[in-house]
Image (cartoon, rainbow, N blue to C red):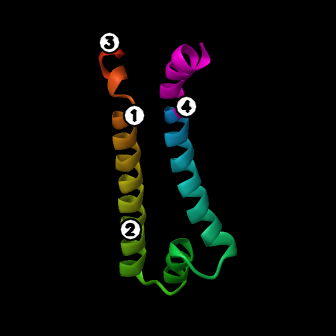
Amino acid sequence: MFVRVMLPAAVPYILSGVRIGIGTAFIVVIVSEMIAVNNGLGFRILEAREYFWSDKIIAGMISIGILGLLIDIGMNRLNNHLLRWHRGLEN
């Protein structure tokens, strides 16, 4: 009963939580790089801010946006692949 009924019913909610969790984790990684680490994208943005290197700040922001978009696209494709059977039930 668990494998045939309960798990398939819960998978859409589990994958939604994973998608939100990965986005939140990505934000936390960038912020923690800004606070505590001497390398990484967040550190480079703060370093560029101190020296008024606006081109590097914008490049870092665009990089964060592109990485976030790629992660979201990847999770969306994973959801669509794993939940092929669930698409018609949305209405």
**Residue where numbered disc 1 is placed:** 82
Q: Are marks 1 and 2 in contact (CB under 8 Å)?
A: no
Classify mark 4: helix, strand or loop: helix
Residue 75 within the magenta-colored segment of the rendering: no
User: How many numbered marks have been drawn onto this rendered protein structure?
Assistant: 4
> Which of pointers 2 and 3 lies earlier in the amino acid sequence?
2
The residue lying furthest to the left in this view is 88
Q: Position of residue 84 (x, y in %)?
A: 33, 27
Which kind of residue does numbered mark 2 sit on? Ser
Q: Are marks 4 and 2 in contact (CB under 8 Å)?
A: no
**In percent of the image, x 55 and y 56: which residue is there?**
27
Q: Nearer the viewer, mark 4 or mark 2?
A: 4
Q: Main secondary structure of the magenta part?
A: helix
Which kind of residue does numbered mark 3 sit on? Asn
**Residue where numbered disc 4 is placed:** 14
Classify mark 1: helix, strand or loop: helix
Classify mark 2: helix, strand or loop: helix
**10 Å neighbourhood of mark 1: few (<14), some, or many (≥20)?**
few
Q: Quadrant of the N terminus?
A: top right
**Residue where numbered disc 2 is placed:** 63
Q: CA distance from mark 4 to mark 2?
A: 28 Å
Q: Position of residue 14 (x, y in %)?
A: 55, 31
Region in magenta: 1-14
Q: Nearer the viewer, mark 2 or mark 3?
A: 3
Q: CA distance from mark 2 to mark 3?
A: 36 Å
Q: CA distance from mark 1 to mark 2?
A: 28 Å
> Which of pointers 1 and 3 lies earlier in the amino acid sequence?
1
